[in-house]
Amino acid sequence: MAVRHDHWIGGKAVRPATGAYLPTLDPATRRPGDEIAAGSEADAGNAVAAAASAQPDWARCSGAERSEALHAVADAIEAGAAELMERERACTGKVPAQLRVEVDMSAAYFRYYAGVLRAHHGRTIDQGAGHHTYTRLEPYGVVAAITPWNLPLNQACRALAPALAAGNAVVAKPSELTSTSTLCLARLARDAGLPDGLLNVVTGTGPDVGTPLAAHPGVRRIAFTGSVATGRHLAGIAAGRLVPLTLELGGKSPIVVFADAALDRAVAAAVQAVAMNAGQVCSATTRLLVEAAVHDEVVAAVAEAVERLRPGVDFGPIITEAQFGKVLDHFAEAGAAGLVPVTGGGAYDGGPGAEGQYVRPTVYAGVPAGARIAREEVFGPVLVTMPFTGEDEALALANDTDYGLVAAVWSGDAGRGLRLAERIEAGQVAVNGGALGIETPFGGFKSSGYGREKGVEALHEYAQIKTVSLSLH
């Protein structure tokens, strides 16, 4: 029998105002999962009220006190890792290695911002001996964090940790398809001593909960990760209310490989884009641009490697039924346009992969830059490749996209790699496997959105600057 999960408001489970619940699905088996509360405007309002009531006392805490509380939440995530992983697995079908990475990173977000918080402060401004002028970094108040279904716990923590560190209270609205790990996080945080009302979770659909939450007059900042269409909708609401907004809207990111690069490492990076979360990662480098002299060699190596990936072992299913259908539609349209995959190009029709919403890892080689599958975010285990000749053409292809979230460059000439990285229109660029982690600010150019998550920059996103000046005369 399915378990029902209520909202988490004011430090306790709260039944939905309508009394209604929504079903979920295990995409690895296509079997029904637990039910989550079908939220409404009334539920969103109750959560905002709880957050607004709790936030002032939290903001008056010292940075050291908030830091200790965030460290306790990190401890709770680590201690509750098994439960969090199972909650996430049940509604996403992810493989254990992927779940482990995401839970570890979720705890790390709280540890990082607990540490950075101790150095989070304003500055003094010299206006002469007769004045004492300084700035303060103050919280907004109540922050709404609307998160997607592909990395539910991880992306919740990515927003929650810096928002709480800066002294805000949060109302989180996870995807109605993958809510239970965020609900579990809120309970673990309460048990770890986080004051009631600072972290509230209201579940339900975007129109029923997300829109009224963003429109609520008590919400003073919004963070959203998801589709461009929904991002535009929320940006319109935020603009009308004159509240700031962080948007992370995905990408169609390039990985540029020159002939003199360490090709084995570049191939491994390209394969990882397919395998990691079955390509359902906004920063996946799914456009493989390869110097013509080694294009066919690289394509052959990538295809051979992705063919060895095992469904349910090396990668998980497509998480939602709707997205599963969209990926298959991309294959059908590519076929109608005369594109033939080197490998993959469909769902599994037998074996373990046929039981769930698994898509065969797919590579399309030599794809025209204007093809739909080369321009739109497929959000599945799909790579498209394009050959180039010379640095200028590589740059032109890399920037020939509406998106600008991340990019990767592989080159035996580090100077050329850096030169290209500085000209690619993207918020993060890795050269020869350069590390990008919690410490490095993350966000997009162009249609990939604006604002930054991760790094010290995220802490500044959730704080506003006040200047205070005292005359000493």
Image (cartoon, rainbow, N blue to C red):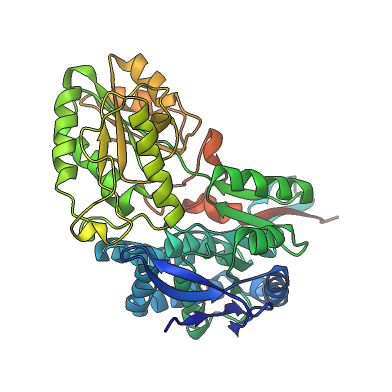
Could you say which quadrant of the image residue 411 lies in?
Answer: top left
Could you say which quadrant of the image residue 314 lies in?
Answer: bottom left
Counting labels gives: 0
The correct choice, above or below, for 24 with respect to 121 in the image is below
> In the image, what residue occupies the spot 64% across and 43% down?
232
Q: Give the left or right position of residue 86, taking residue 413 as reference.
A: right
Q: State the image coordinates of residue 417 (x, y, percent, origin top left).
A: 30, 27
Q: State the image coordinates of residue 298 (x, y, percent, origin top left).
A: 17, 29
Q: Nearer the viewer, residue 30 or 88?
A: 30
Q: In what quadrant of the picture does the N terminus appear?
A: bottom left
> In the image, what residue occupies the spot 49% across and 63% down?
156
Q: State the image coordinates of residue 366 (x, y, percent, origin top left).
A: 27, 23
Q: Nearer the viewer, residue 183 or 218?
A: 183
Q: Is residue 68 visible?
A: no
Q: Nearer the viewer, residue 217 or 413?
A: 217
Task: Residue at the far right: name it.
Answer: 473
Q: State the image coordinates of residue 16 (x, y, percent, origin top left).
A: 64, 78
> In the image, what residue occupies the spot 43% across and 45% down?
326
Q: Give the left or right position of residue 417, taking residue 451 as reference.
A: left
Q: Is residue 79 visible?
A: yes
Q: Nearer the viewer, residue 115 or 23?
A: 23
Q: In what quadrant of the picture does the C terminus appear?
A: bottom right
